[in-house]
Amino acid sequence: MATNVLINQENRVDEAANRQTGRGFAAGLPTFGKTWIDITFLTILCAVLRLPWLFIIPISKAPDEGAHYWVLKFIWNAHRLPALADVMTDPHAAYYGALATLSYFPHLFSAHILRCFDPALAFRFGSVIASIAAVIGAYGIGKELFAKSRLASYAVPLFLVLHPQLVFVGSYTNNDCTSVAVSSWLLYLCVRMIKYGITPVHAVVLGLLCGLQAICKPTGFSLFPIAGLSILLSMSINQQSKLVVARRVGLAVLIAALVAAPQLLKNYVLFEGDLLGTRTMLRAWLKAYGVAENMYKWPLIDNANWRFLLYVTFWGAFGNMDVLLPGRFYKWFSWMMGLASLGYIYAIARGVMSGLAPIIKRHRKEIACFAILAISLAVSLVGTVISSAFLNSAGPAQGRYLFPSEAAIATLVVGGLTLLGGRFSAWHIGAAMLLLASATVYGWSMLFLSYGFSLNIFR
């Protein structure tokens, strides 16, 4: 009797979720009509902005591209994954050889279909493909959270399209772009789970995305606790049965394990138990370059130089992080973020004066979604501090370590500007997009004047 009641309850929850979402997880994805037009436009714009960068950046002026190229060239020529002996034979260039190779799949795919180009150049198109996938995931988040404002919903993916540092990273070979793409879709799924509950399809997709994230760049691991917290919020807000949720989470864990296990076992066998490859990476790095003096003292976040480098390398630091935008751009980025923060303060103040309880009850799902995105940014920042401490002697602060939360940052900025209200929000969102576009065009012009245009990246 109790079992029948539980099954009926589960069915009612699924039916309610399906009524709200149209066709389960597929609702809100590019299926027909205006959505296809939006996706097509964003895809073209994303590619058009990145391709001019792709043809002007020498490999020596793209951070670590030589090391990424070594991995891809090895796989392309040897038709197998590198082993420990391969990495330690050439540690100056091969230190990324032990890391998970899923991040390079788009690059291998692009080289396979673009045989008219030299593989070194063709690999770069994989970063463009992954960037487009990230933009589409952000488009889904915008549609879910800003359904009443086309401008705001469109501004979220446009943020990813126009962000100058993301444009730069999306135009050369690296393992960041694939991680950003998987992260954007995982954040989109978290938003949908909070709004509509955890359906069986959500569980399958969650397992697939978490499995893929586990074998992408380790900076993306910061989203695992976000996925877990989203499940708890979804179960509470949508009043789903604990047993039902447990079964679906179990399914997700099983799928994630099946997706990630082959890569992790490969690393365990080929790299002496180094599941993630990070120990081997550092071992190769130290063999090649020796032990450098630590750049920062713990805790890193109280170091003004570390904070400055993190900030400028997130927004725009090109070449080998030695080509910066004019200082006024970074000040304007600060103004944009300050205005967004002011929007949240203004909304909270209004809520306190009018009574928070009814507002929270009426908009609890949207508030939970924004809270999970804010927590995502906070966890990514903690992960960035940990990564910088782990690689303390290997380089400066890296703003791209925050990229797994890029879609969250975009949504939080647009959301804050929207909360300013009325014409102010529209003007400020438009100004923010114009600022990003201007910085991207200016950055490209600086690099073009320095490097010129060429199909040969080895120059």
Image (cartoon, rainbow, N blue to C red):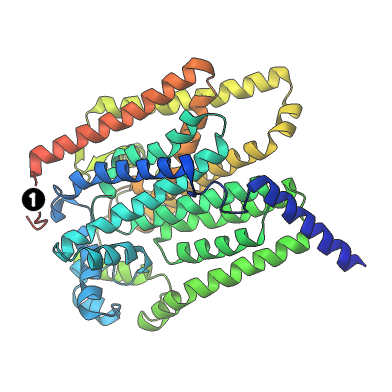
264 shown above or below 214: below
Residue situated in front as seen by the camera: 248 or 232: 248
Question: Which corner quadrant of the image does residue 318 belong to?
Answer: top left
Residue 9 percent across, percent down from the top left? 82, 57
Residue 78 percent across, percent down from the top left? 22, 80
198 shown above or below 319: below
Question: Residue sitting at 29 percent across and 52 percent down?
Answer: 128
- SS for callout 1: loop
**Residue 91 located left or right of residue 276:** left
148 shown above or below 66: above
Placement of the N terminus among the 4 image quadrants: bottom right
Question: Residue sitting at 22 percent across and 58 percent down?
Answer: 65
Residue 350 percent across, percent down from the top left? 65, 19
**Residue 287 located left or right of residue 347:** left
Question: Which corner quadrant of the image does residue 364 belong to?
Answer: top right
User: Which residue position holds label 1?
Assistant: 454
- Note whether residue 181 is visible: yes
Residue 235 percent across, percent down from the top left? 72, 52
Question: Residue sitting at 49 percent across and 72 percent down?
Answer: 259
**Residue 222 located left or right of residue 455:** right
- Note whether residue 233 is visible: no
Residue situated in front as seen by the camera: 310 or 143: 143
The crowding category of the residue bearing disc 1, from other C-alpha atoms within 10 Å (few below 14, some 14 to 19, many at least 20), is: few
Identity of the amino acid at label 1?
Ser
Residue situated in front as seen by the camera: 324 or 343: 343
Q: Residue furthest front?
A: 33
Q: Residue furthest right?
A: 1
